[in-house]
Image (cartoon, rainbow, N blue to C red):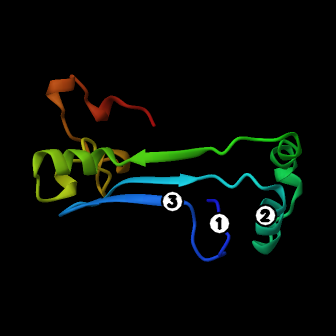
Amino acid sequence: MRLNDNQKTVVAIDVLVPKVGELIGRSQREARLDILVKRIEDAGLPLEPYEWYLELRPFGTVKHSGFSLGFERMILFATGIDNIRDAIPFPRFPGGLIFGYSIRLPFLNFHPENLSI
């Protein structure tokens, strides 16, 4: 994320909604070469794996940002469901699908026991 000139805050915003929390997160990416190099060094990381990315900066770049929307949180907000676990279409949990628990989902004609993982 891009640090502001005060070195204490970043260029970012979160959309918070009642009973859900953060629905959307947005931040601007860091594009200043000197700041990027300093942050990599401050993190104790080697510069070599990032050279390809750093080499793009001297030729100029545009300010760019990104955002994310939590799908399950949006469903929770739109429907008024009380628990986010009820909004997740394929939840992961111990003893669940990935861990060998066999469930039948007839509406998808899908039977996990036939999978070879």
- Residue drawn 43% across the image and 54% down it: 25
- Residues under numbered marks 1 and 2 in contact, where contact means CB atoms less than 8 Å apart: yes
Looking at the image, residue 30 sits to the left or right of residue 27; the answer is: right
How far is mark 1 from mark 2, CA to CA?
9 Å
**Crowdedness near tag 1: few (<14), some (14–19) or many (≥20) residues, C-alpha within 10 Å:** some
Looking at the image, residue 81 sits to the left or right of residue 63; the answer is: left
- Type of amino acid at the residue the image marks with label 1: Leu
- Residue drawn 25% across the image and 46% down it: 74
Does residue 93 lie above or below 97 as drawn? below
Q: Which mark is residue 3?
A: 1
Under circle 2, the secondary element is helix
According to the picture, the residue beneath numbered tag 3 turns out to be 12
In the depicted view, which residue is nearer to us: 75 or 60? 60
How far is mark 3 from mark 2, CA to CA?
17 Å
Sequence-wise, the earlier of marks 1 and 2 is 1
According to the picture, the residue beneath numbered tag 2 turns out to be 35
- Type of amino acid at the residue the image marks with label 3: Ala
Sequence-wise, the earlier of marks 1 and 3 is 1
Under circle 3, the secondary element is strand
- Type of amino acid at the residue the image marks with label 2: Ile
Sequence-wise, the earlier of marks 3 and 2 is 3
**Crowdedness near tag 2: few (<14), some (14–19) or many (≥20) residues, C-alpha within 10 Å:** few
